Image (cartoon, rainbow, N blue to C red):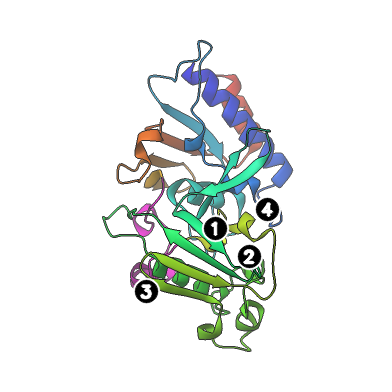
Amino acid sequence: MKRKLALLLALVLLLSVFTAACGKEEPTDVKKEEEKVADEPKEGSDGDIDDEQYITLTITEPQAIDPSTSNDIYSGDILNEITEGLGRLETGEDGGDIIVPAGAEDWDVSDDGLVWTFHLRDYEWEDGEPVTAHDFEYGIKRNINPETAAVFAYLLYPIKNAEACNSGEKDLDELGVKALDDKTLEITLEKPCAYFDKFLPHRIMYPQRKDLVEQWGDKVGSEAEYTISCGPFKLTEWTHKSELVLEKNENYWDADNVKLEKITYKVIEDPSTAYNMLSNG
């Protein structure tokens, strides 16, 4: 069963190599990035979860595993597994996509639709430090900071003064994002935006550790040791142009519902090579 599952998932990702051509991620379609492997238990023909509980997938070499500077699909896949944003994409009872609370236990929207207030749950980074509203504020501001040159910064333009801050016309202190305390994040929009919640699971709104970003500098996301997890998995190995290994993050707040122990991504640049490897077992 394990081998069949790995083959199936690898073939799916192999197809994406042809369609995406390892290029820029389509920013208006955040569905792929928001879906966590950990959220969907893998079943065998008898309906039981595979006892070995690990899968192997094929990808091409990711860019830096940095939510601000990367823009490719595969970096997004890794970030999605190691980070818990404010919300998570799930499939509703009618088969449609819905956004459900994740890093935030819940949120409120003001009557005029301008102010979104997020109430964070108690959860931690893999080193035991708490994830706070300040981490979300910093992450969003880092993406808007013109010096970062984040490709997906424009997705944040519904936020008050975001476009002006991103162009350098206004200071980042004027951005409509504020940590009211460690557990409360307030985001003010330019005007009501009915689809704003669709960005909650996207890397552009992930929490980031200011202390580590400043400590690591240009090394952020360049090696496994320069990443940090607050999601279901943590990046433990990255052998460039060979493989990346993600292992279950036991400090994850919802670890009991993470069924996989390990995800191995095999880096294969040539799609025909990937196909031959899979065909030959």
Q: Nearer the viewer, mark 4 or mark 3?
A: 3
Q: Which residue is mark 3?
A: 214
Q: Which residue is mark 2?
A: 152
Residue 15 lies within the magenta run: no
Q: From mark 4 to mark 3, how far is it between C-alphas?
A: 29 Å
Instruction: Say which amino acid is labelled 1.
Output: Arg
Instruction: Say which amino acid is labelled 4.
Output: Gly
Q: Nearer the viewer, residue 173 or 184?
A: 184
Q: From mark 2 to mark 3, how far is it between C-alphas?
A: 21 Å
**Observer able to see residue 221:** no
Q: Are marks 4 and 3 in contact (CB under 8 Å)?
A: no
Q: From mark 1 to mark 2, how far is it between C-alphas?
A: 9 Å
Relative to 116, residue 98 above or below: above
Q: Nearer the viewer, residue 161 or 272?
A: 161
Q: Which residues are magenta?
A: 207-231
Q: Does label 4 or label 3 sit earlier along the sequence?
A: 4
Residue count near mark 3 (Cα–Cα under 10 Å), binned few <14, some 14–19, many ≥20? few
Which residue shows up at 43% across the image and 49% down it? 82
Residue count near mark 2 (Cα–Cα under 10 Å), binned few <14, some 14–19, many ≥20? many
**Dot 3 lies on which element?**
helix
Q: Which residue is mark 1?
A: 203
Q: Which residue is mark 4?
A: 23
Residue 153 location, x and y as percent?
A: 62, 69
Residue count near mark 1 (Cα–Cα under 10 Å), binned few <14, some 14–19, many ≥20? many
